[in-house]
Amino acid sequence: MKMIGMYTAAGAQLAARALAEGKALTVTHAAAGSALTDPQATVMAAREQVLTIHSKTAQDTGCTVAAVLNAADADASYTLREVALFASLAGEDEVLYKLFVLDESLLVEPDTDLVVTVYLTETILPAQQVQVNVSQQGLVTQAICTQTAREEAQAIQANLEAHAADTGAHSALFGQKANTSHKHGAADVQSGTFTGIVAAMSSTAYTTAQVRNIVLNTTEPSGGSNGLVWIKYTA
């Protein structure tokens, strides 16, 4: 969407005076209209609602005014055809300064959440006409944002539910894990040092070579278990 901006007769005089007299020109407010105002007029042909000035950004040769139209603030439904800027010099009354005409109309209904931001370029150089491109992002409504967020949340929830219902979702991962009751054979222990006291099992297979528990003591053998080797020594 594009908008064509033009000075009103009073606006052109105001801009010329600002340059000639070196006075500050202030954009006071913006308004939306449903009709096309004659540039020679001093009031809008069909003023529908005041817009909120969101920001004024200065550049080398002028500034950009960001004006926000909130449909909920409108008294009744209307078709947006133009946006007007009002301005004044210090200590003077404001005048209808510039008119920005839309190249395509837009229906504004107060029972919707339509919010439109228009970026209006103001130049400090005398000119009869400037073209302003309005970002399409200005046409993104709260309803669209809410619907998009809702759809994203639903998609995430659906993925979580599908994952929970898939009994094999983690099978590949679990396949890499050892069972809690698994055992290693003696051949798997090839080096290293036990960091604590490790006891062999009790066994009566006395003729079979195996790891046995050994006790070194100065007393006679006592207690113990089958397969224990007790060595008595003299201190």
Image: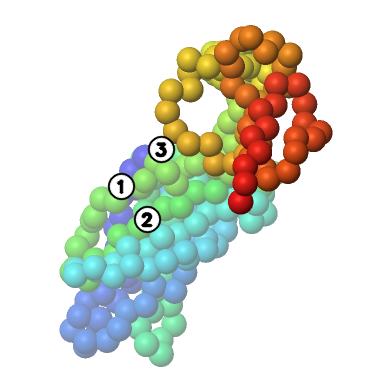
Left or right placement of residue 112 versus residue 98 in this view: right
At which x and y percent is residue 2? Answer: 33, 43
Q: Residue at x 37, y 63 (%)?
A: 65
Q: Which residue is mark 1?
A: 133
Q: Quadrant of residue 151?
A: top right
Left or right placement of residue 132 versus residue 195 in this view: left
Residue that extends furthest to the bottom in the rendered view of this protein: 91
Residue density around tag 2, few if under 14, some if 14–19, many if 20 or more, within 10 Å: many
* Of residues 151 and 123, the one drawn nearer to the viewer in this rendering: 151
Task: Residue 104: give its label.
Answer: 3
Residue that extends furthest to the front in the rendered view of this protein: 234
Compare marks 1 and 2 and give the one earlier in the sequence.
2
CB contact under 8 Å: marks 1 and 2: yes
Question: In the rendered structure, which amino acid carries the disc numbered 3?
Answer: Glu
User: Spatial distance from mark 1 to mark 3, Cα to Cα?
Assistant: 13 Å
Question: In the rendered structure, which amino acid carries the disc numbered 1?
Answer: Asn
Location of the N terminus by quadrant is: top left
Disc 2 secondary structure class? strand
* Of residues 135 and 233, the one drawn nearer to the viewer in this rendering: 233
At which x and y percent is residue 13? Answer: 27, 75
At which x and y percent is residue 38? Answer: 38, 56
Question: In the rendered structure, which amino acid carries the disc numbered 2?
Answer: Tyr
Task: Residue 119: give its label.
Answer: 2
Compare marks 2 and 3 and give the one earlier in the sequence.
3
Q: Residue at x 46, y 52 (%)?
A: 117
Compare marks 1 and 3 and give the one earlier in the sequence.
3
Disc 3 secondary structure class? strand
At which x and y percent is residue 114? Answer: 58, 44
Q: Quadrant of residue 14?
A: bottom left
